[in-house]
Image (cartoon, grey):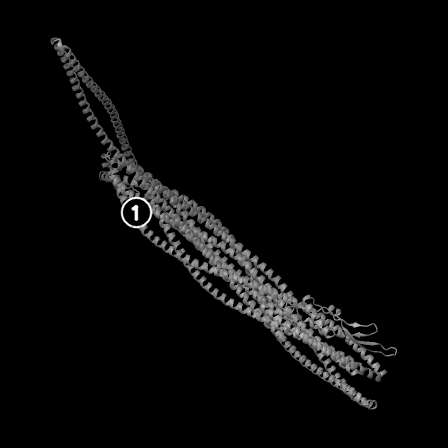
Amino acid sequence: MALRRQNDELDTRVKTGEAKITTIENSLSSAQTEIRKITELNDKLQKEKQHMMSSKQKVEAEMDMTKERIRKLELEIEKVKQENNTLQENEQKARQVHKEEENKISRFERELKEAKAEIGELKKALQQADEESKELFESAMRANAQSDEMNQYETTEITEVKVKELRDKHKLDLRKLENDKDDLERRLHLMEDEQSEKQHAVHRLETEIDELKVQYQLETDRLKAEMASAEIKYQSELDDEKDRHNRDVESLTVTAEELQNKISLMQKMLEEAKNRENILQQEVVDSEEKYDILSKEMQKLRDEMEMTRMDTDKDMEKWKTDAYKAQTEIKTVESANETLRSQLSAASERAVSLNSTINEQNVKIRELNTQLRRLEEELAGTKAAFTAQESDLENTTTKLHSVEEQNAVFQVENNKLRTELEAITRQADTLKNTNEFNESEMERLKKKVMQLTASGKGQNEEIEKCRNERDQLDRSCREKTKELEQLKEANKTLESKVGRARLELQEISTKLIAVETDRAALRGEAEKLTKEVNLVKEQLQKKSEDFHAALDDVANAHRTSEDGRVNALHELEARKFEVGDLKSRLENSEQRLAMLQQEYVSVDKERDTLKDSMRRFQSIINRSMIIEESVDVSTIESHLQKLISRVDTLEKEKNEYRDSLDRIKNRSSTSEITVEKRESTYRAFEGRLVDAEDGRRKAELKLASAKEVIKSQEETLKQLDEEKRNLKSKITAFELEARGKDAQIRHLNEMLKAVQVELENSQNDSRALREREEQWETSRIHLEQRVSSDDGESRVKVLMATFEAERQNLSESLKKLTSELQASENKNADLKDDAERLRRDLLKAERVEVELRRNLEDQTRITRENQQLRDQLGHAQSDLANANGRKQQLEGELAAVRAELRDQKQYLHDAANRTAELQRQLQDTSSEKSRLSDRIAGLEKTIGTLRSKEAELRGQISVDANERKTLLAELEEMRRRTAQMENEKRTVSEKMDETNRVCVSLTKKIEILEAEKHSAELLIHDTASQRAEIERSLSAMERENKELNKNCAQLQQQIAQLEMDNGDRLIALTNKQKEEHDKFVQAVKAEKIQVTLTIKLHYLFHVSCRRRNGRALTSPQSALSSYYTVPSQQHISRNIGYRASSTTWPNEGTARESYTYRAATTSDVLSRASGVSDAFEAGSSRVVPTLERSEGGTFSLLQRHNIRIWDIFIPKW
C-alpha cells in the first residue's frame, strides 16, 4: 500500500511536472513568436532607416552634384571674365606697344636724319682736307723749285717725312671714316629692317583691329536679332510656363493633400508601432518574469526528481532487505522442513506440522508473487509515463515545425509590408524633391523676370553703347544660354512629373492586382489550414489509437486521459494563435483597402479639378459670347465710336482667347487621355466586380450549405452533450464503486496481515515445541545413562506416554491451524476473484471514459470549426456587401464621368463654333484700325496681367515656402522619431540576444532531461531482467516445494507402515538418528553463524562502496545498473562433504531410503564468499536449484540455498 501511495504521488508529481513543462513550452513558444515579431519590426525599422539613409545620401549626392555644377559654372564665368580681362589688357598693352613703337620709329627717323647730317658734314670735311692737302703739295713744290740746292736735300727729306706723316694720318682718318661709314650703314640697314618689321606689325594690327570691328559689328547684329527672337520666345515660353505652373500648382496642391493624408496615416502607424513596442516590451518583461518563475519551478522539479530517485533507491534497498528477509525465512523454513522430516520418521504428528509449514510457505510465496506483480504494474506505469513523455516531446516538435512555418508566412507578409513602406517613402522623397525643384524654379523664374525687365529697359542704351558694353552683352548671352538650359531642365522635370503620374497610376493598378492576389493567397491559406486541420485530425486519431493500445491498467488510463486534455489545450492555444494571425492579416488587408479608397478619393479630386477647369472654360466662353441685337440705322453713327473702342478690346480678348484655346486644347488632349485610361480601368474594375458577384453567389450557396451543416452539427452536439452528461453520471458511479472496492481491498489486506501475524505466532509456538523436545531428549539421554535398564524402561514408557499426549495436543493444534489456513486461503481466493472482477470493471469504465472523452474532444473541435466557419462566412458576407456598395458607387461615378465627358465634348464643339464666329468678326473689325496701336495696347495689358500673375506667383511662392517650412519641421520630427526607433531597436536586439541565450540554456536542459530519461529506461530494463530472474528462481523453488510435498506424503505412508511393523526398533533407530541429527544441526548452526558473519561483512563492505560511488558519481546512470547472481557451476565444482544416514529394513516390499545432507566447512564457505566476489566480476546472473534423487528411491535435499538465493540480491559494483 505504501508503495502504491508513493507511486501515485510520483505519478502526480510527474503529471504536474509535465503540465509545468507544457506551460513552459507554451510560454517559450509565445515568447519566441513575440521575439520574432520584434525581430520583424526591427527588420522593418532597419530597412526604413536604410531607405531613409539611402534617400538622404541620394539627396546629398544630388546636392553635391548641383553644387559642383554651380561651382563649375562659376569657374567658367570666372574664366570668361579672366579671358575678357586678359583681352582688354592685351589690347591696352598692344596700344601701348603701338605707341611705343611709333615713338621709336619717330626717334629712329630723327636719328637717321642726324646721321645723314653727320655724314654730309664728314663728306664736307674730307673734301676740305683733300683740298688743303692739294694746296700744301702745290706750295711745297713751289718752295722746292725756288730754294737752293744745299737745302734741297734737307727740305726734300723733311717734306717727304711730313708728307709721309700726313699720308699716314690721312690714311688713318680715312680708315676711321670708312669704319664709321660701315657702322652707320649697318645701323641704317638694321633700322630699315626694324622699321619694315614694325610697319608690317602695324599693318597686321590694323588688319586685326578691322577684323575685330567687323566681327563685333556682326556679333552685335546677331545679338540684336537673337534678342528680338529671344523676346518673342520668352513671351511664348512665359505663357507656356505660366500654364504649366498653374497645372503644377494644382497638382502640387493635390499631391500635398495626399502627402498630408499619407503623413497622417504614417503617424498613426508610428503611434500604433510605438504602442505595439510598448506592449511587446511589457510582454518581454512578463516573459522574463515567467521565465524566472519557470526556471525556479524547473529547479524545484529537478530537486523533486532527485528526491524521488533517492526515495526509489531507498525503496529498492528496502525491497532488497525484504527479499533478503524472505530468503532467510525460506532458509529457516527449509531447516524447519528438514527437522520435521527427521521428526516425521519418529511420529506422524510432525508430518502434519510439516504440511502446515508447507502451506505457510505457499502463502508466503503467493505474497511474494503478489508483490512481484505490483512491482510489474509499477514498472508498466513508469513505462507508460515515459511513453507519454515521448509523445509530448513529439507533439512539441510538431508544434515547433508549425510555428516555424507560421513564422515563414509572417516573414513573407512583413517583406510585402516593407516593400510597400519603401514605395511610400520613395514617393514622399520624390514629392519632396519635386517641391524643392519647384521652389528653385520659382526663384529662378523670379530672377529671370527681374533680369528680363532690367534687360528690356536697358536694351536701347545697350544698342547705342555696343562697343563700350561688349562684356555686358557677352555676360547677358551666357546668362541667357544658362536660362535656356534651365528651361530645358524645367521641361524635363515636367515630363518626369508626367511620367511619375503615369507610374503612380500603374502602381495603383499593380496595387489592385496585389490586393486580388492577396485575396487569392488568403483563400489558398484557408484551404491549407483546412488541410492541416484534417492532417492534425488524422494524426490525433493515430495517436489516440496508439495511446489506447498502450492503456492496460487503471492508472495508465487516467494518465493518458490527462495527457490528452493537455494536448487538446495546446491545440486550442495553437488555434488561438492561428486565429489571431488570420485576424491580423484581415486587418492588414482592410488597411490596404482603405489606402486604395484614399487613392480613389484622390482620383475623384482630380476629376473635380477637371470639372472646375471645364466650368471655368465655359464661363470664359460665356463671357466671350456676343449678343446679337437688332441695330437701327439711326444708331449706326453712335455705335461706330463704340465699335472702334470695342475693337481694341476684342483684339486683346482675341489674343487672350487664342492663348486660352491653346491651353484648353492641350488640357483637353491630356484629359481625354486620362479619361480613356480611367475608362479602361473602370471597365477592368467592372469585370472584376462581375467576377466578385459570381464569387459572392458561390459563397452564398456555400453559406447556405454550411448553415445546414451547422444546424445538423448543432443538433448532434446537443445529443452529444446529453450523452456526455449521462456518461459523467456513469463515470461518477463507477468511481464510487471503485472507491468502495478499494476500501474492501484494503480491509482484505489488513486481514491478510493479521493472518500473517497469526502464522508467525504459530511458527514461534512450533519453535518453542521443538526446543522443549530437544530438552526432553537431552534429559532422556542423561536419565538413560544414569538409571539402570529396568528403571530406564519404566521411565521411557512414562516419557513415551507423556510424549504421545503432547503429540496428540500438537496434532490437534496443527489441525486447527490447517483448518484456519484453508479458510483464509478460501477467503484470499474469493478476494482475488473480486479484485480481478473489479479490475475488469475498472478497465471497462476507463475504456468507456476514453471513448467519451474522444467524442467530447471531437465535438468540441467540430463546434470550434463551425464557429470559425461562421466567422469566416460573416467576414465574407461583409466583404461582399462592401464590394457591392463599392460597385454601385463606381457605377454611379462612371455614369457621372461619362455624362461629364459628353457635356465637355458638347461644350468644346460649341466653343469651337463660337471662336470661329469671333475670329470672323475680329478679322472684319481689325481691318479698320491700325495694328500698331492694338499691339501697344495689347502689350500694356499683357504687362499688367504679367504683373498680376507675378503677384499671384509670389503669393503662391510664399505659401509654398510656408509649406516647405512645415514639411521641414515634420522631417525633423520624423528624424527624431527614427532616432528613437533606432534606440528602441538596439534595446530590442539586446533583449533578443538575451532570449536566444535563454533558449540555448533551455535546449541544454532539455538534453540533460533526455539523458536522464535514457538512464531511467536503462534502470527499468535492468530491473525487468532482474525481476525475470527472480521469477525463475521462485518458480524453481515452487517446483522444489511441490516435490517436497510429494516426498512428505510418501514418507508419511512409509512411516505409518513402519510404525505398524516394528515400533520399538523404529524408536531406537529414531533416537540414534536424533542424536546424529542433533550433532549435525549443531555443526550446521556453527557453520551457518560463520557464513552469516562473513556475508554480513561482505554486504557492509559493498554498501560502503556503493555509498562512496553514489556520492562521487553525478550521472544518473551509475546507480543500480545491473544485478548479479552466482552461477550454479561454482557450487557444483566445490569440494563439499556429505553426511549420510540410512535406514534399512529386511522386509519385502519396503523401500530403502537414504537421506543425504550436504554440509560445507568454514573453508568451503569462505571459498564461496570469494566465489561471490568473483561472480560480481563475471557478470552472470543465473540460479539453477538442483534436486538429486538416487535410483533406489533415495533423495537428497542439498542445503545450497543459504548462499545462492542470497546471491541474487547482491548488486554488482
Element type at mark 1? helix
* Residue at (57% x, 57% y) in the render: 531
- Quarter-of-image position of residue 913: top left
Looking at this view, is 881 or 446 the one in front?
446
Q: Is the C terminus in the top left, top right, bottom left or bottom right quadrant?
A: bottom right
Please identify the residue farthest to the front as the structure is shown: 150
Numbered label tally: 1
Q: Position of residue 654 (x, y in %)?
A: 30, 40
Looking at this view, is 532 or 892 the one in front?
532
Looking at this view, is 215 or 503 the one in front?
215
Q: Position of residue 326 (x, y in %)?
A: 69, 76
For the residue marked with disc 1, what is the amino acid? Leu
**Where is 505 relative to 533, above or below?**
above
Residue hosting label 1? 953
Looking at this view, is 217 or 428 the one in front?
217
**Where is 620 relative to 380, above or below?**
above
Question: Is 36 placed left or right of 192 in the picture?
Answer: right
Q: Position of residue 553 (x, y in %)?
A: 64, 70
- Quarter-of-image position of residue 327: bottom right
**Where is 477 relative to 1003, above or below?**
above
Question: Is 923 placed left or right of 385 in the picture?
Answer: left
Q: How busy is the neighbourhood of tag 1: few (under 14 within 10 Å), some, or many (20 plus)?
A: many
Q: Is residue 231 visible in the rendered structure shown here?
A: no
Q: Is the N terminus in the top left, top right, bottom left or bottom right quadrant?
A: bottom right
Q: Position of residue 396 (x, y in %)?
A: 56, 62
Q: Is residue 333 visible in the rendered structure shown here?
A: yes
